[in-house]
Image (cartoon, helix red, strand yellow):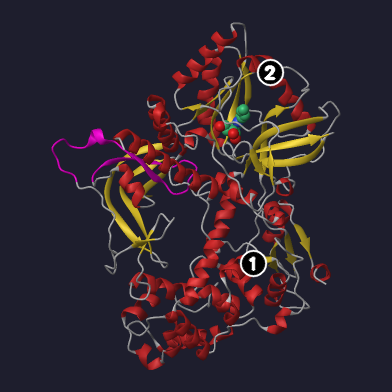
Amino acid sequence: MSETEQKINNLRAEIERHNYNYYVLSQPEISDFEFDALLRSLQELEAAHPEFFDANSPTQRVGSDLQSDFKQVEHRYPMLSLSNTYSEDEVADFYDRVQKGLNEPFKIDCELKFDGVSISLTYHKGILVRAVTRGDGVRGDDVTANVRTIRSIPLRLNGSDFPEEFEIRGEILMPWPVFEDLNRERERQEEPLFANPRNATSGTIKLQNPAIVASRRLDAYFYYMMGGSLPTDSHFENLQLARKWGFKISEAMRRCSTMEEVSAFIHHWDVARKELPIATDGIVLKVDSLYQQRNLGFTAKSPRWAIAYKFQAERALTQLMSVSYQVGRTGAVTPVANLEPVLLSGTTVKRASLHNADIIAGLDLREGDFVYVEKGGEIIPKIVGVDTSKRVPGHLSEPVIFPDICPECSTPLVREEGEAAFYCPNERGCPPQIIGRIEHFFTRKAMNINAGSETAEQLFRSGLVEDVADLYDLTDMQLMQLERWAEKSIRNFLDSLERSKEVPFERVLFALGIRYVGETVAKRLAKSFLSIDNLAKASLEELSEVNEIGGSIAGSVVRFFEDEANRILIERLRTAGLQFSVDPSLLENQSDILNGKSIVISGTFQFHSRDEYKALIEQHGGKNTGSISSKTNYLLAGANMGPAKLEKAKKLGIEIIDEDTFLKMIE
Ligand code: IVH
């Protein structure tokens, strides 16, 4: 194989991997800018070497987000993408091409490029009949049930001057404040965070439960109408009409007659977009007249009458001081760049994520390098490039090499197939993993033991505790010999260990720290399998049948119980008196009536204690949360509740219910 062919093959494989991360996993590892750069180098190589053409090359398709659980339907008109550019010169080239192609006066509509999930809606006689994702451009997922939950999408149109049958395309988005709320909640629940609103949106729109989708408060903007008999020849005018019919059409839209006006629009929104409540990543330019659009036509993949200009994400240049490697509770090794502090989008950045070994190798990173840090839609800044011109000539700099052994216990690291992260497999001998598990066991949502990370570390280092079962063998004599332990703290600690024996099974299951089994998954597993013995016997298939339990969770549970050491640990915990099955009295009177509902309890009550109300909410599928946010569905209000809470609930329009109403609801 020639060197060029090898290069083309490598690029194709790499791009396919990023496609999968982006469209299927919703977990991109690189920025759009980097992805576009990769795709462009492949396009160039393929153009120069047509002998290596391959119909399956990633340049020949638009990416797929198909998911098996939805009905797939063919688009009546394929959903094409736009050609895009990061350069204003190329926008001017586009303008010239249009001018030459049409050879008559024309107007260009400038719009924001919304950074969400594209959707195509079909309306028949003014009624929403279908909502389909882009999929591979030809076929997409029918997500109508989920889309119906989006408040800003009209189910029935206003007026009567709309075509009998038409499609309208737009972007589903999660506004920044909603995204931030959601991630805060996920952090509390120890669930993985969404990297940006787009990923959160695409994760949400593919949920199998429309009730949860509804609670995520998505939004949608529309920008493209198609059909046999659209009201006018002007794209701009048609969208103004669509606004009257009930669609959300951005006000940030301008019909321009010169390239100067186009440039002014770009410059204005490059800055002004930062004040918007939604993510945008560029400007879309479209020829206004539909007649002229038809005349210009399409290339194989995109229209000749439109182009997307993409904004450069905010970035700063700073020096890489060192790279540290952190080992987490699950053994995953995460590289973190320690940077010379630098100001970026209003905050000082000292550390940046390097994600994984591939990213480090791809950047050819050296210690002391000047690096670009970017904070695009992401919360954690990341390193996106190296300014190699700033390397001192003749000075041999050390490449950053991802360790092949664990920085904490020197065990050779492993990488599981299909995973980007390296793991230290020494679960039972690697200190941060053991300490992390003990610390996790202590947390309030797990066993609620009166201790934190320092105690976890001290107990482990003293040799008294090597796994969580050892905790229940501790005596006051042993603790007395440790530093900083007074009689009272010993009493408190041992008492809370004693009390933890009453902690319900679902929380014990969460406390075990099985990879991917967060609080919600633990609850679901406990509810479906009722005891640890049933769960330990469950096959991969049986596990996967449980709602929202995917393949990786199921696999992780099976592996956990295959490990003899884990089975011994569970037997020791059982002997210590922990709960390993669901309390049968709780199984009566269960329902799903509050599924997807988030309820805040406040004040004092007559018929039940607050804890009992909390249990009732959960028994009926709801979620009890601590503080009121725009995501709260009900405030269960008792006597003497704080005025601030009441005020906030009223302001956010949250339904306030009393004891009687609540008890009737779950009857
Ligand atoms: S027009 C045939 N307008 O960007 C052209 N697209 O790569 C139809 N997008 O798939 C698309 N904002 O998901 C258009 N104002 C806008 C847009 C927009 C965001 C997305 C859309 C499309 C992609 C183009």
Name the image quarter holding residue 220.
Answer: top right
Measuring from the top left, give residue 122's x and y in whole percent.
Answer: 75, 36
According to the image, label 2 marks what residue?
290
Is residue 376 on the magenta stretch?
yes
Q: Quadrant of ligand 1?
A: top right
The residue sitting at the right extreme is 160
Tell me the magenta residue range.
368-397
The answer to whether residue 190 is seen in the rendering is no
Q: Nearer the viewer, residue 448 or 245?
A: 245
Residue at 65% from the left image edge and 40% from the top image edge: 139
The answer to whether residue 280 is seen in the rendering is yes
Is residue 604 on the magenta stretch?
no
Q: Considering only order in the chain, which callout, 2 or 1, is on the residue closer to the N terminus?
A: 2
**Is the C-beta of the residue carrying label 2 under 8 Å from the nearest atom of ligand 1?**
no
Measuring from the top left, give residue 627's x and y in whole percent.
Answer: 63, 62
In what element is the residue under mark 1?
A: loop
According to the image, label 1 marks what residue?
546
Q: Is residue 164 above or below residue 485?
A: above
Residue at 36% from the left image edge and 50% from the top image edge: 354
Q: Is residue 570 above or below residue 244?
A: below
Residue at 51% from the left image edge and 12% from the top image edge: 96
540 on left or right of 365: right
Q: Nearer the viewer, residue 338 or 108?
A: 108
